[in-house]
Image (cartoon, rainbow, N blue to C red):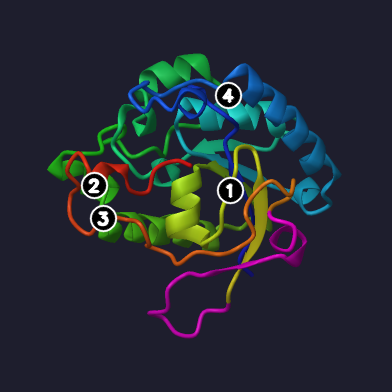
Amino acid sequence: MPPTLILIRHAQAGHNALKDYTIPDPDLTVEGHGQCADLRASLIENPIVQKAELIVVSPLRRTIQTAFRSVDWLMDKGIKVEADADWQENSAKPCDTGSPVDRLKEEFPTVDFSKVDPVFPDKTSPAASQYHFTKEAILARAQIALKKLYNRPENVIVVVSHSAFLRLAVSGYWYFNADYRIFDFAPMVGPDDRYHLQQHESTREKGGGLGRSWIDPIVLGSELPVEDPDAEGNKLGRDY
């Protein structure tokens, strides 16, 4: 049986606060740390999250920092933290481009980076086509990310990722900073069926686990550019 997913958006980072998307791989802000405290309290009280057996993080600083400040209590139980480049944000702006893995390993030695795609943090070269900022690439990457989790042996998995990727490619719902939603995989109709998620009523009806996100769903793939975007097009799918 496929796992239940706890999808978390990172807390506020520098580019969110300053609306400056040229900041490379930004850290959480002071407000972001406060948001993590609220997130942590909510997750601890959630009986489904209590059963988590794996934590998956986008290998960017703000997502890893959010994990360490919100699900540290799971880590204290011995739950493993794995970094996966498939869960990184959509655009190739500096704020959405990660740091070199060697540097991340030094800062976060307890995170398993062994399965991170060797092309990371490249998002623009031909070799990094899986991470290009196009509708086709982003939707395909979401399917790859979901397939890997669908086939995992764990019953409950926590994923810390990014607003636009979660909203536009994975689930079709809004995520404000440090909010989360809970999903099960929809039944597969056939071998060629795409992976779809069905949200638990507990987070759907109130707009996320903390009730801070907009309730209305959106269409997967909307706002994403069909072709490689120019400077104007690169505004699409931004991290709201």
Helix, strand or loop status at disc 2: helix
Mark 4 and mark 3 lie on one chain; the one further toward the N terminus is 4
Residue 92 position by quadrant: top left
Q: Provide the residue designation for mark 4.
A: 110
Q: What is the CA distance from the residue labelled 1 to the residue labelled 2?
A: 22 Å
* Identity, as a three-letter code, of the amino acid under mark 3: Pro
Query: Bounds of the magenta span?
Result: 187-207
Q: CA distance from mark 2 to mark 3?
A: 7 Å
- Residue picked out by circle 3: 225
Q: In whole angstroms, how far apart are the C-alphas of marks 1 and 4? A: 27 Å
Q: Is residue 151 above or below residue 164?
A: below
Mark 2 residue type: Gly
Q: Nearer the viewer, mark 2 or mark 3?
A: 2
In the image, 226: left or right of 214?
Answer: left
Residue 147 shown left or right of residue 214 in the figure: left
Label 3: few (<14), some (14–19) or many (≥20) C-alpha neighbours in 10 Å: some
Quadrant of res 144: bottom left
Of labels 1 and 2, earlier in sequence is 1
Q: What residue is shown at x 41% (from left), y 39% (from top)?
A: 115
Q: Indicate the amino acid at tag 4.
A: Thr
Q: Residues within 10 Å of mark 2 (few under 14, many from 20)?
A: some
Dominant SS in magenta: loop
Marks 4 and 3, Cα distance to the nearest angstrom?
Answer: 36 Å
Question: Does the stretch in magenta take in 199?
Answer: yes
Of residues 108 and 78, the one nearer the viewer is 108
Q: Which residue is mark 1?
A: 175
Single out the residue that lies furthest toward the bottom.
189
